[in-house]
Image (cartoon, rainbow, N blue to C red):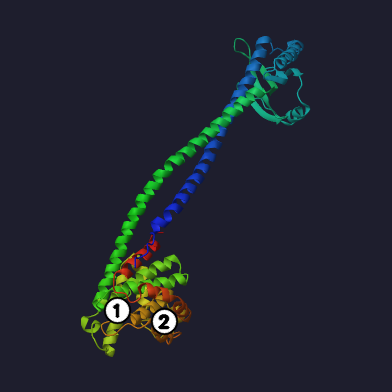
Amino acid sequence: MKTPHHPSRLEIRLPSLHRRLALRLALGALVIGLLAGAATLTLELERVDATIVALASQEAAAFTEQSPGVQEAAQAPLIQQRLAAFLRKRQSQHQGHFLMAEIYTPSRQEIAQANEGLPADVARQVETSRHRFPPGHRSWYHKIAAHDRLYLQVLTPLFTADGRPAGTLEGIYSIPPAELQVITGRTTAMVALVVLVVMITAATLYPIILGLHREQAELSRDLLKANLDTLAVLGSAIAKRDSDTHAHNFRVTLYALGLAERAGLPRAATRELIKGSWLHDVGKIAISDSVLLKPGPLTDDEFTVMKTHVRHGLDIVHQSQWLEGAAEVVGGHHEKWDGSGYPQGLKGEAIPLNARIFALADVFDALTSRRPYKEPMPPGQALEIMAQGRGRHFDPALFDLFVRTVGPDFQAFGGREDDRARLLLMRRAQPYYMA
């Protein structure tokens, strides 16, 4: 029968990776775009303010050209007339103009004031806005929005034709709707362009990052395969010392993995269970052949020596950080639920869960497999014998789950001595290490 294909974790994760990478890039681009857009908007608004203040200053300069002597308080009546006439003329030309203006001498004495159609609510806002005369020859401004229009309260210096200070003009400048529309459109376009550039950059980076991740994933998969192969070879070498086959190692790991999955064991714990199952008897490498391969029953002294394989196994796995988690199975697979096991005599849930799972798999495979000294036992008979150890040797809840669910596993690989169990285990184990 053809072995079914189990997609690797890499194959399973690629569509998910595409989505997560695209989502993260999109979110990152959105955040960067918003920040860049906000920064651009701030800069553009500052430029807009400077442009509008410049327009207001041009209007003030135009008034100065038409009204020489504005700095002289003695000419206040004449300046008052000229200011009112100037505002009416500018308003009739339907362009940016002052709706209200006040003229101050260089000594900050008000000598003229004119109001040509300033809305009352805007006037009230002006009254509540304390202006200040800017130092030097700079301008001061304050924006006022009303009636879908934008107004600028501005103080701007006045100069004579020969460049001497002529006073200060304070006015409410009405920004032309057409000019405001152009400014708004330009600002919007600039912000949109910045955001678009960020999004295009993110879209360009997506295939590059994805390609780099593919390469990294391939390298990780190769390294993982090398680790798993080494693990399997080491486990097989130990199994070969103990019997004429290493298939037991693969079968028992598959049984343990199946029970762990059905029991809902977390992924991290399952990874350690797989490693521990492969290496459960690694300490037997330190047991002499006279004890390990003795065909008959062991004496008490020999059994004492045999039990030291647990300690030797722990010594071995503790030398590798990657194998540290396997210690639960290596050190606990001979413990028993009632506390009569070894090496620590742990009892009940004090026995690591991985060790309790593996104990069921180990005994079941030993009973249902052919050994040089015995024939394989039917699974039903094996479970009947194991039932005698329920609550004594085995965790009763795990035993009940094992009895209900082990059938399909036995049908798939139980007692087989060919390469099927090895191939199946490699396919099923890999996904747990490709997270």
Q: Residue at x 43, y 44 (%)?
A: 206
Q: CA distance from mark 1 to mark 2?
A: 17 Å
**Residue 105: x %, y % from top left:** 69, 17
On the picture, is 280 further left or further right than 383?
left
Which secondary structure lies at badge 1? helix
Q: Please name the amino acid that badge 1 sits on.
A: His
Quadrant hosting residue 270: bottom left
The vertical placement of 162 against 270, above or below, is: above
Tag of residue 166: none
Placement of the N terminus among the 4 image quadrants? bottom left
Q: Which residue is mark 1?
A: 309
Tag of residue 346: 2
Q: Nearer the viewer, residue 187 or 245?
A: 245
Please rate how many residues cluster around mark 1, counting C-alpha atoms within 10 Å: few if below 14, some from 14 to 19, many from 20.
many
Q: Which residue, as the protein is rendered here, is positioned at the far left?
A: 290
Q: Nearer the viewer, residue 304 or 215?
A: 215
Task: Tell me if I can see residue 124 in this picture.
Answer: yes
Q: Nearer the viewer, residue 343 or 5?
A: 5
The vertical placement of 383 against 411, above or below, is: below
Quadrant hosting residue 102: top right
Q: Residue at x 57, y 30 (%)?
A: 187
